[in-house]
Image: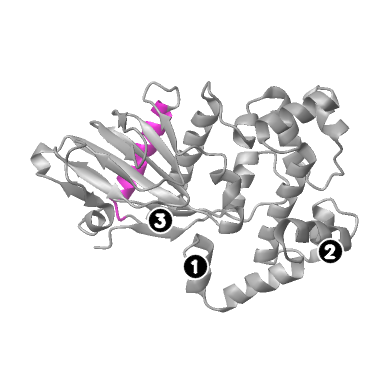
Amino acid sequence: MKSILSYASSTAGSPLGSTDPIASAIGLLRPHTVVDPGLRATQPWSVRFDAFPHVKIGGVVRGECWLALDGQEPVLLREGDFYLLGNPPSYRMAGTLTAKPQTAEALWETATNGVARIGPEAEEDTYLCGGYFRFDEPNASMLIDILPRLVHVRAADPRSKLLAHVTELLNSEVENNAVGRSLVLDHLAQILFVHVLRAHAEQTDRPTGWLGALNNDGIGAALRALHADVARRWTLQDLAGISRMSRSAFAASFKKQVGTAPLEYLIQWRMSLARDALRRNTRSISELASATGYESESAFSTAFRRITGSSPKQFRDSAHHAVSSGPDQEILARSGAVR
C-alpha cells in the first residue's frame, strides 16, 4: 500500500483584495499538502526525518516523545501538544533519545491502512500524527522567513482543545478509504495549520513579521486595510490614520514589527499577487497594473522588474513554458522539487 497521501491543494484562486491576510497569504502559497501515516510506537523507538525547506506540522495524540532538531536542545512533547517546524534541519522524533533511529522514509513504506507501527501493537504507548506543506517557491518566503524553527503549542494552550478535535477527524480520515477522503484531508490539514499559526501569533512572545503584527490593534488594522484594497493609492498618512498614530510613529512601529517600511511592504505584496496572477494567466498585464494600484502598464512593469528581476511578460512566458512542458513537470515545479 502506498504510505504517503499526496495531493494538490484544493485552495481556489483568491481575488487581489482580501480582508484576511492569513487567508490571502495561504491562497498565494498554493499549499501542496502531504499527510503522513499515523505513527503508533512502543518504547524504545526513534525516527529520523530529513531537512525540509517549507513547513512540517504534527501532534502527540497519546503518550509523549522527544523532538530533537539537529544543533538544538531536544524538546519534550507531551500528550495534547502540537508542533510546527519552519524550514527545519534534519531532526528526530523519539521515545528514547538513546534509541537507534530508523528513517521516516523507510518506516512510511511499511504503513498499512494509514498507520505505521514500531514494536508490538499490544504494547504501544505513543501515537503521533503529522504531515507537511510545500509551497509555491516564488512566494514561500513570505511565511518561511517569519517562522521560527519550532512553534510549540502546549496542551494547556486555549486552542489545544480545538486542535485535538481537528486531529481526531484527521486521524479518522487517514485510516479511512471513504469517498472524498483526499479533499477532507486537504481541508483538515489546512485548518490545523491555520490554528497553529494563530496560536503562535497569540503567544506572549509574539513573532516578528506580519503574522505577529496582525494582533496589534493599530498596525494590524492598517495591514487588513492594505490587504483589502491593494489597488488604492495608499499614502503613509492614510495608513497612519487607520492605525490612529502619527506618520513617524506608525512608520517606526510598522518597520519594527513587520520588518520593512509600510509602502515597501505594499509593493512586495502587490508583486506577490501579480506573480500569482501571471502564472495562472488570469489577468492581462494592463489589468494587473490597474488592479495593483499603478496608473500605467509601464509603471507596473518597472516595479515588477525591480522586485522580480524580469518583466511581467517574461515572467508569464516562462511560467507558461513550464506548464506546457507537461502536467507532471508543472506539479513538481510548483512543489519546489524542480529548480
Are the residues tagged 2 and 1 within 8 Å (C-beta)? no
- Residue bearing mark 1: 338
Residue placed most toward the observer, 338 or 226: 338
238 within the magenta span: no
Q: Quadrant of the N terminus?
A: bottom left
Range drawn in magenta: 160-177
Name the residue type under label 1.
Answer: Val
- Residue bearing mark 3: 182
Could you give the CA–CA distance between mark 2 and mark 1, rounded to whole angstroms?
Answer: 30 Å
Find residue 160 and report its horizontal and vertical position in percent. Answer: 40, 27
The correct choice, above or below, for 325 with respect to 173 in the image is: below
Find residue 293 and report its horizontal and vertical position in percent. Answer: 84, 50
The residue at 40%/54% (across/down) is 34
Name the residue type under label 3.
Answer: Ser
Whether residue 243 sits left or right of residue 175 in the image: it is right
The residue at 50%/61% (across/down) is 336
The residue at 84%/64% (across/down) is 286
- Residue bearing mark 2: 286
> How would you rate the neighbour count of disc 3 (Cα within 10 Å): few for under 14, some for 14-19, many for 20 or more?
many
